[in-house]
Image (cartoon, rainbow, N blue to C red):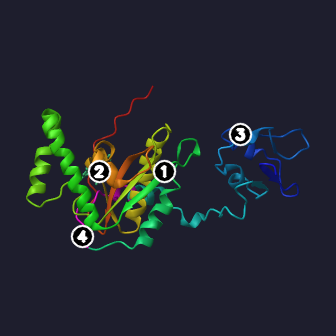
Amino acid sequence: MSLISVDKDKCKKDGICIDECPVKIIHFPDKSSTPETFKGAEDFCINCGHCTCVCPVGALSHINFTPDTCPPIQKELLPTAEQAAHFLRFRRSIRTFKDKNIDKNKLEKVIDIARFAPSGHNFQPVEWTIVYEKTKVKKLTGMVIDWMHSILKALPKKAAEMHLDFIIAAWETGSDTVCRNVPHLIIAHGDKNNPTTHDSCVIAMTYLELTASSMDLGCCWAGYFNVAAQLWEPLKKELNLPLDHLAYGTMMIGIPKYKYHRLPTRKKSTISWI
Ligand SMILES: Cc1cc2nc3c(=O)[nH]c(=O)nc-3n(C[C@H](O)[C@H](O)[C@H](O)COP(=O)(O)O)c2cc1C
């Protein structure tokens, strides 16, 4: 079966699929023909589905994408630029959570949108680990504190720069400034040998945070946790990620205790025009 098939009655020969193909494997074999792929195209196709989805008349089917399996864009559901800007400014890092679990279905829904984030070469290398039980989050956070103790001992200057002594002292008085007493953690991880995995995980996490915000859930990046998840053997063992995987982002996720009423300001952008 060929990579693409074109409905000759529907195709307008406008060449849009040819222009849009990111790896340039589609062409007109001659003036009167409909588009076809070059010989050996399968080796270059990145399975992005753009050829099927950009065709205005639904004439092109890719072996993995047909006009029937790719839903039409519903323009009425797209935010205006003003709505999108307001929503993006509205997202906050949430650090105080209700002592209540999020339904597992809801967590899966958030991840189901995050998987549409861009990824290098469309590799889609991101995998997810959810730490669902709060007791387990606490146990893992305790391991992050163990890692902090080890850094404090081995690299006291570095530890002071990262304020690890304060975090440990807070933990000892019952205050969790690492994972903020959150009920759940979501970890994005993937093959450390793939050069696109890091960026793809970070972008997918950003999609996840924005999606959660649209669903009245609260997120906060767990930066300390993630560094420990990359470096501290006991924590790595407990997370049980595949051997060739690295954690590239950890997100706290829960139901926010409070609502925000204003949008904070930020530094002005620094832009160089060259
Ligand atoms: C990579 C990264 C790591 C972060 N790690 C932590 C963290 O460990 N603990 C925390 O409370 N906030 C963490 N944050 C949240 C930032 O402090 C927060 O994004 C920043 O203060 C701006 O606030 P806003 O997200 O509400 O706009 C992290 C954010 C990023 C992007």
- Depth check, mark 4 against mark 3: the one in front is 3
- Give the CA distance from mark 1 to mark 3: 22 Å
Residues under numbered marks 4 and 1 in contact, where contact means CB atoms less than 8 Å apart: no
Which mark is first along the chain, 1 or 4? 1
Which mark is first along the chain, 1 or 2? 1
Which mark is first along the chain, 3 or 4? 3
What residue is disc 1 on?
126
Q: Amino acid at mark 4?
A: Lys
Q: Amino acid at mark 1?
A: Val
Depicted 49 relative to depicted 180: above or below: above
Mark 1 neighbour class, 10 Å CA radius: few under 14, some 14 to 19, many 20 or more: many
Q: Chief secondary structure of the magenta span?
A: loop
Residue 5: x percent and y percent? Answer: 81, 52
Mark 2 neighbour class, 10 Å CA radius: few under 14, some 14 to 19, many 20 or more: many
Q: Residue at x 17, y 58 (%)?
A: 176
Which mark is first along the chain, 3 or 1? 3
Is the CB of mark 2 within 8 Å of ligand 1? no
Secondary structure beneath dot 1 equals: loop
Q: Which mark is residue 245?
A: none
What residue is disc 4 on?
257
Residue 109 lies in the magenta-colored region: no
Secondary structure beneath dot 3 equals: helix
Q: Which mark is residue 235?
A: 2
Secondary structure beneath dot 2 equals: helix
Residue 174 shows in the view: yes
- Depth check, mark 4 against mark 2: the one in front is 2
What residue is disc 3 on?
43
Which mark is first along the chain, 2 or 4? 2
Q: Which residues are magenta?
A: 87-99
- Give the CA distance from mark 4 to mark 1: 30 Å
- Depth check, mark 2 against mark 3: the one in front is 2
